[in-house]
Image (tube, grey):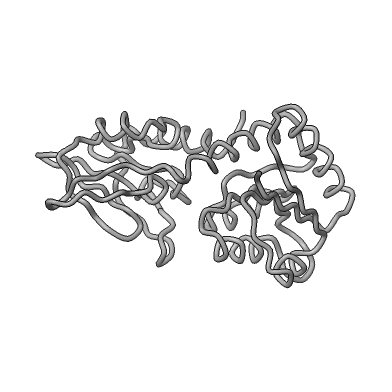
Amino acid sequence: MFEILICDDDRAVTDELRGLLGEYAGRTGEALHITALTSAGDAIDGNLSCDIAIVDIEMPGTDGLQLTEYLQAKNADVLVLVLTSYMKYLDSAMRVNVFRYLSKPVEKERLFRNLSEAVARCRELGRTVAVKSGGEIVRVRTNDILYIENLKSGSVVVTKTARYQTSKKPEEWRREIGLPDRFVFSHKSFLVNLQNVTRIGRGGVVFLTPEGEKSFPIVSQRRFRALREAFFAFLGGSR
């Protein structure tokens, strides 16, 4: 069962989303336990945690970004879908590493597609790969990987907290990890994990790390456009 939190100060929206999630559960057979609130403060005061949250950005008092930061502190693997009719908030939302964004009014099929991706991601979060480095074998969560850099011999796997020099090449890691929509080449020598990316610019790729945002100059001019399009698609964007 997945714990789902809905938080929007408009009760009509929370009621609509509860109904849609019920329809989604009936269609897919997924077991969902849904908590719907109209106050982000109530979620914090109630010490709530969840697997997936659908959070409005602009709410009186404690706003959706503050709630997102609280939920991420409670559970680093929580997946937050930002709900907003104000596109100006999206940059801020990306800085707290939201999973997807949904515009108002909610499009049912897009919501269902994003929910399916979130459920699949929840199942993937426990996925690990065995990394042989320095005479040791370490189990590394794929969700913790920032990027993999090609070396003359092998590669270095850079995670949120450590670096592991390995004999495998980035393309070998990409095949082994098996998440081609998430692990994308930003440069012929760099394979990045879009799950931990907050922004992409010509100056580099910005990752969310335990110390905050960090920019790495690991994007080539030739791959820049394709990388941006892959990131847009990963975030659930549509044209």
Placement of the N terminus among the 4 image quadrants? top right
Residue at the spot 51% in from the left edge and 58% down from the top edge: 76
Residue 59 at x, y percent in the picture: 77, 62
Residue 22 at x, y percent in the picture: 80, 37
Say which of 117 and 48 sits in front: 48
Say which of 5 and 236 sits in front: 5
Residue at the spot 68% in from the left edge and 35% down from the top edge: 30
Residue 25 at x, y percent in the picture: 74, 34
Does residue 68 appear to the left or right of 149 in the view shown? Answer: right
Placement of the C terminus among the 4 image quadrants? top right
Residue at the left extreme, as displayed = 153
Quarter of the image where one finds residue 45: bottom right
Number of marks in the rendered image: 0
Residue at the right extreme, as displayed = 12
Quarter of the image where one finds residue 75: bottom right
Residue at the spot 58% in from the left edge and 58% down from the top edge: 92
Does residue 136 appear to the left or right of 237 in the view shown? Answer: left
Residue 188 at x, y percent in the picture: 24, 34
Residue at the spot 20% in from the left edge and 35% down from the top edge: 169
